[in-house]
Image (cartoon, grey):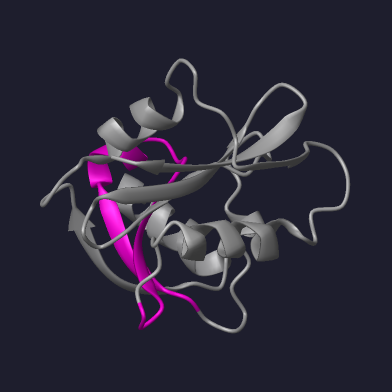
Amino acid sequence: MRTSEDRLVELIRSSGLDVHTVQGDEPGPSVGTAWRAMAGFGVEPSASLPLKGDLEGVHRLWLEHARRADVIGEDGTFLLTAVVTGGSAVGWVRVRLTDDADVARLVDDQGRIEFIARSGSGGHICGITAEEYEYWIVSLTL
C-alpha cells in the first residue's frame, strides 16, 4: 500500500525534479507554517497567471521568482512540498532542478498546481497556489 511519502515523492519525480532526501520538518519552519503563511490575510501574489489556459510559462515564471527570492541554492537544490493526501505530515523533500523539470506538473487531485518551495535556510518560500480564477506565485520571507 502506498504511503503519503510515496505519493509525494512520486508526484515530485513526475515533475522532473531530482529527489535527494525526505527531510521532514526539522529544522523548521514546518510545512504547516509555510502553508499558513501562503494563505495568510493580506498575502498578495508576486505574479499571477490565468487558472485556465496554456501553462507553458508557469515553470519559467516561478523559477524567475524563486531565484529572486533566494529559494534555490547555487547547486540547484531547495526544499519542496506539494498537495497530496497526508503530505503535510511528510514534511519537506530536498530536490534539485533538472533540465527536464516543470513545476506545472505538481498538480493536486483536482488538477491544480499547488506547491511550496523553501530555501535550505528556511527563511524564504516561493510557491504556487490556485485562487478563484488565477494561479498566484507567492514569495515570502518567514
Q: Which residue occupies 39% across, 61% down?
A: 71
Residue at image location 56% in from the left, 57% down from the top: 65
Q: Residue 118's spot in the image, x, y percent?
A: 34, 54
| Residue closer to the observer: 80 or 57 | 57
Horizontal arrangement in the rendering, residue 66 relative to residue 21 (left or right)? right
Q: Which of 63 and 56 is in front in this view?
A: 63
Question: Where, quadrant-wise, is the C terminus in this rendering?
Answer: top left
Given the current orientation, which residue lies at the most extreme right position? 53
**Which of these two is toward me, 134 or 5?**
134
Depicted 34 relative to depicted 78: above or below = above
Residue 91: give x, y in percent of width and height: 25, 47
Is residue 117 left or right of 30 when viewed as pictured? Answer: right
Q: Give the range drawn in magenta.
A: 74-97
- Residue 11 part of the magenta segment: no
Q: Reply above or below: 41 against 29.
A: above
Left-right relation of 129 to 87:
right
Residue 88 pos. (x, y %): 31, 38
What residue sits 26% from the left and 50% below the top?
123
User: Residue reaching furthest top?
Assistant: 41
Residue 135, compared with residue 116, is above or below; it is: above
In this rendering, the count of numbered labels is 0
**Residue at 31% in and 59% down:** 119
